[in-house]
Amino acid sequence: MKLLVVDDIHSVFLEKTRQAGFVVDYFPELDRTGTEEIIGDYQGLVIRSKFAVDAAFMDKAFDLKVIARAGAGLDNVDDLTAAKRGIALLNAPEGNRQAVAEHMLGMLLSLLNHLHVAHGEIRDHHWLREENRGLQLSGSTIGLIGFGNNGQAIARCFSGFDVKVLAYDKYHADFDSPYARSVSLDELKAKADVLSLHIPLTMETRGWIDQGFIDSFQKPFVFLNGARGEIVHLPAILQGLRSGKIMGAAFDVLPTEKFPALGEETWFEELANHPQVLLSPHVAGWTVESYHDIASVLADKVIALLV
């Protein structure tokens, strides 16, 4: 069984799969064209986000048995075509769920206490205490949409803050958890002071968080997105910030990522310069520890499937 790895991955993946008897070729410098030229010789493809694994690519991967993504999502893989061709899809959300949870919690605390703003002010020799009076998280109601790996991890993180955690999951309703209560979407919209997304990007969720969705909340809230940028309609977020319906927003993911394309978006300058917006470059799940854990979890899954 031959595996082709075309993205950077921790060496633990190579060690585990080779010990299990696989031939593993590690070519992280390959682009799509180079990968297409040789993929017909392999039964497994390991990738992160380098390129889309679509139907045209799979036409050239005639012996492919598995596509393994070193990350949480599978939105760059054509899952319908893979299913038709009997190609198994694997990912490793268990490997970075704690990293995502801690990162988004940190962004929330920074927003509530104006840490990102106050740091810049002090750097510029401004000492403003009253203007940076914060809000405590204690006593708040946290609303989570999605209660899979990431949703459950952040619910555990919130458990030490004396908050109520409500979670809506269309495909995992009435779950039993010591860290969150399963609720309807209507109840979440009525009670949440903080909204955090933990859902994949699908045809159903693309553009879901729009103006109507935001307006349907019963009170102002803080918005967190560490899921996928394309789930959110950014102009609606800006309108919510202008109206006060959204008190603050933190994004680790955006609909457009990397420059120069990001800087050319009509909404970028207003979003980036808003004092109650905090941005990070899609790194929530990319810690030193998760780099290892993602690779280790993925190796175990590949071995279990193919050996």
Image: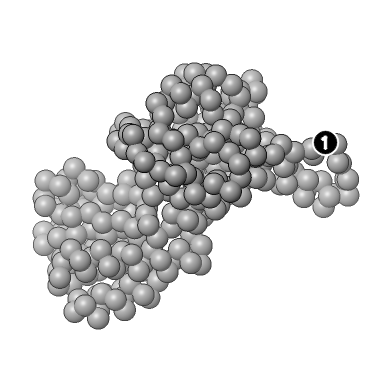
**Image vertical order of residue 243 relative to residue 50, above or below:** above
Residue 2 appears left or right of 246: left
Total residue callouts: 1
Viewer-side residue, 275 vs 168: 168
Viewer-side residue, 166 vs 87: 166
- Which residue lies at the image location 24% right of the left edge and 46% below the top edge? 78
List x then y, in percent, for residue 88.
Answer: 18, 55
- Which residue lies at the image location 44% right of the left edge and 44% below the top edge? 178
Please, which colouring scheme is shown? one colour
- What amino acid is at disc 1? Glu
**Image vertical order of residue 234 relative to residue 65, above or below:** above
Local crowd size for mark 1, using a 10 Å CA cut-off: few (<14), some (14–19), many (≥20): few
List x then y, in percent, for residue 58.
Answer: 17, 53
List x then y, in percent, for residue 47.
Answer: 31, 60
- Which residue lies at the image location 29% right of the left edge and 76% below the top edge? 16
List x then y, in percent, for residue 27.
Answer: 32, 71
Q: In this rendering, does residue 140 appear at all?
A: yes
Viewer-side residue, 273 vs 245: 245
**Image vertical order of residue 39 relative to residue 263, above or below:** below
**Image vertical order of residue 66 relative to residue 238, above or below:** below
Mark 1 = which residue? 131
- Which residue lies at the image location 18% right of the left edge and 72% below the top edge? 2
Q: Regarding mark 1 in the picture, which secondary structure is present there?
A: helix
Residue 139 appears left or right of 102: right
Q: In this rendering, does residue 256 appear at all?
A: no
The N terminus, quarter of image? bottom left
The C terminus, quarter of image? bottom left
